[in-house]
Image (cartoon, rainbow, N blue to C red):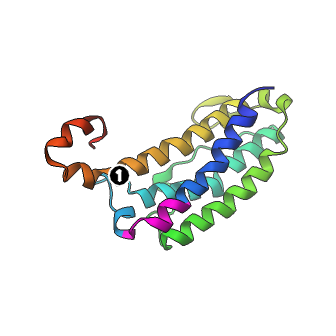
Amino acid sequence: MNPILTWAPAILESTPARWHGFCADLPEGLLRRPAAPGEWSALDCLQHLVDTERVVFPTRVQHLLNGEDFPAFDPDRQGSGPAPLTPQALAQQFHALRADSLRLLERVQERDLARRARHQELGEVTLSELLHEWAGHDLMHTVQAERALMQPFIEGCGPWQIYFQDHVT
């Protein structure tokens, strides 16, 4: 069996719990603080995950299963912008949307991984490539959020900053 059929759903299933922990346990001011001017805060990352869960990844899986091409997604033009909900409400919304997506992924079989469609910007893509991208996307934006959360602590740690050079934005 192709490992992406177990790896991607495992990552995708774990992500909402991580976000629930952030949103339930961390102060809202920290969650809304961007890593640097013009960059995303942790909540901006979560809002982006909600946006892509709503209109990108499950939709693309369905397009690939149906053999249909699909458009690109521009988060700056098509995203929701700053999170209007409380952190806990946004995390709950993400959890509900992800639960629906995981039910969709239960239908994907190994033979479906080779299905192809045309992405508006990238050209021909497979369902296997999309599943890899989806899991990587979850991890990338969770790491991005964690980097945003780290910045005030790095800034305030004085001489220990030298140990954080790889994480300064």
Kind of residue at disc 1: Ala
Res 106 quadrant in image: top right
Q: Was residue 119 drawn as part of the magenta stretch in this picture?
A: no
Residues in magenta? 20-28
Residue at figure coordinates x 44%, y 61% from the top left:
43
Q: Residues within 10 Å of mark 1 (few under 14, many from 20)?
A: many
On the question of residue 78 being in view, the answer is no
Q: Position of residue 46 (x, y in %)?
A: 50, 57
Please tell me whether the stretch drawn in magenta is mainly helix, strand or loop: helix
Left or right position of 25 against 100: left
Res 96 quadrant in image: bottom right
Q: Nearer the viewer, residue 81 or 139?
A: 139
Left or right position of 66 against 121: right
Residue 1 against residue 157 in the figure, above or below: above
Residue at figure coordinates x 71%, y 49% from the top left:
58
Left or right position of 110 against 51: right
**Label 1 secondary element:** helix
On the question of residue 132 being in view, the answer is yes
Residue at figure coordinates x 32%, y 50% from the top left:
150
Q: Nearer the viewer, residue 68 or 115?
A: 115
Residue that mark 1 sits on: 148
